[in-house]
Amino acid sequence: MRPRSAGPLLALVLLPLALLAAGCSGPSPEPDRRSATAGSDPAPFEPCPKLDVPPVPAGSSAAPAARAPAESPAEAPRTAALGVVAMETAPGGGHRAMPAVTLDCFVGGERVDLGALRGPAVVNLWASWCGPCRKELPALQRLHERAAGAVRVIGVDTRDRRAAAEETAADLGITFPQFFDEQERLLIGLERRVIPVTAFVDGQGLIRHLDESGALDDETLGKLVEQHLGVAVAP
């Protein structure tokens, strides 16, 4: 009797080794479900600044002396318990304080309380799937560049996936600092339901104006910053 050929058996043994050598593997885990603190993939954004000190203009060692912003009609003071956060009002009523919401920075994963924010600052809530948000982002990036530190520009990616946000930012050339807010905590704290929302925050951490137009451009941003934060930004 002729011995059975070892060819088929040898092929079965070598096939898995060949596949392993070729780098074959199963599907990659969903990247957007990673913890925001993982920090394993580079994001296109700048590191998040220290929020509890005023911004410092480029080439200066001191915070800018902003003019007193124009007063808008005071909002009716109210305090609404919203589960994770509560809306605050300034002493004596009027302008609201930034909600005390702790979020993860996209770069480095540091957890930061946005309630500690001291402006002048512009805080934009956006998402990759939001058309008006994508239209506004380039103007906010240009404000970030033109302000040269005199006005802090911050993004909060809301109800989104990290990978989608990073891809959108790379496509649009967005680099200003970003926080990740998958659960919409800041949006809830601001008592808003839709995005984009842009908050103009003064040096005391008070929201002087909320814009929900979804149509911010260079000219409009410049006017709102000067009107509500008292800082003139060169075009």
Image (spheres, rainbow, N blue to C red):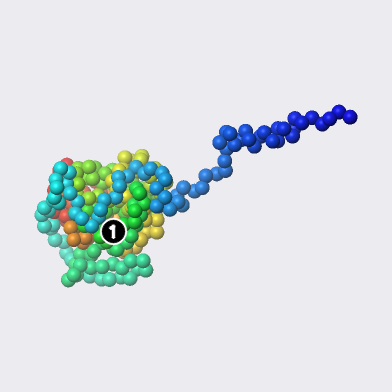
Q: Secondary structure at mark 1?
A: helix
- The front one of 172 and 163 is 163
- The front one of 198 and 186 is 186
Q: Is residue 40 visible?
A: yes
Residue 56 point in image, percent of width and height? 17, 49
| Drawn side of residue 7 relative to residue 92, left or right | right
Residue visible at 43% across and 53% down in the picture: 35
Residue visible at 45% across and 51% down in the picture: 34
Q: Is residue 168 visible?
A: no
- The front one of 125 and 98 is 98
- Does 165 sit above or below residue 205? above
Residue 14 point in image, percent of width and height? 67, 33
Rendered-image quadrant of the C terminus:
top left
Residue visible at 28% across and 63% down in the picture: 99
- The front one of 59 and 122 is 59
> In the figure, residue 184 lies in which quadrant?
bottom left
Residue bearing mark 1 = 114
Badge 1 crowding class, 10 Å Cα cut-off, few under 14, some 14 to 19, many 20 or more, is some
Residue visible at 29% across and 52% down in the picture: 124
> In the figure, residue 158 lies in which quadrant?
bottom left
Residue 159 point in image, percent of width and height? 39, 55
| Drawn side of residue 127 relative to residue 60, left or right | right
Rendered-image quadrant of the N terminus:
top right
Residue 80 point in image, percent of width and height? 30, 70
